Amino acid sequence: MKRFHVHVSVKDLAESIRFYNGLFGTPPAVEKPEYAKWLLDDPRISFAISQLERATGVDHLGFQVDSDEELKALREQVATARISAHDEPGAACCYAKSDRYWVEDPQGVAWETFHTLGSIPVFGTKPEAASKTDACCS
């Protein structure tokens, strides 16, 4: 089953965690020094925030899937629609190892579709070291 994904860049992580804890009525499933993520069931959403050196606001949108089969089906859907995609198998980002791919909509909004394989002890690569579709979580 898919979970809608939203990643927001924030100015103050602690203040934002307090706000979203109140808004969602639950603490984050993952909380790290520069990152937090809530996995909500109603509505079914993967909502992440990070405090990095980038503009604040919505960073990217996407879908988190529960299986490799779902990821492959969505990737095939994108290919059939002739939408250019950047595949990243085994990506290390946001304290997780994931198979994922990125697309960009006509307005330039980045969309990430990913299947989390496990957790890792680091956030990932520096976002400024890569292009928009190669960066960790962007």
Image: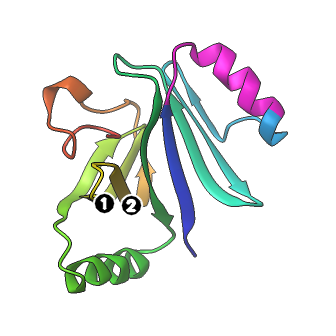
Q: Residues within 10 Å of mark 1 (few under 14, many from 20)?
A: many
Mark sitting earlier along the chain (2/1)? 1
From what the image shows, is residue 56 above or below residue 1? above
Return the residue found at the far front.
107
Observer-nearest of 47 and 57: 57
* Drawn side of residue 90 relative to residue 54, left or right: left
Residue located at (15% from left, 37% from top) = 131
Residue labelled with disc 1: 100
**From which residue to which does the magenta span run?**
9-22
For marks 2 and 1, give the CA distance: 4 Å
Residue 95: x and y in percent read 43, 37
Judging from the image, the colouring scheme is rainbow
- Assign a secondary structure to mark 1: strand
Q: Amino acid at mark 2?
A: Phe
* Residue 112 to residue 72: above or below: above
Across and down, in percent, residue 52 comes to 39, 19
> Along the horizontal axis of the image, is 20 left or right of 77?
right
Q: Main secondary structure of the magenta part?
A: helix
Residue 132 lies in what quarter of the image? top left
Residue at x-position 64% and y-position 15%? 14
Q: Which mark is residue 55?
A: none
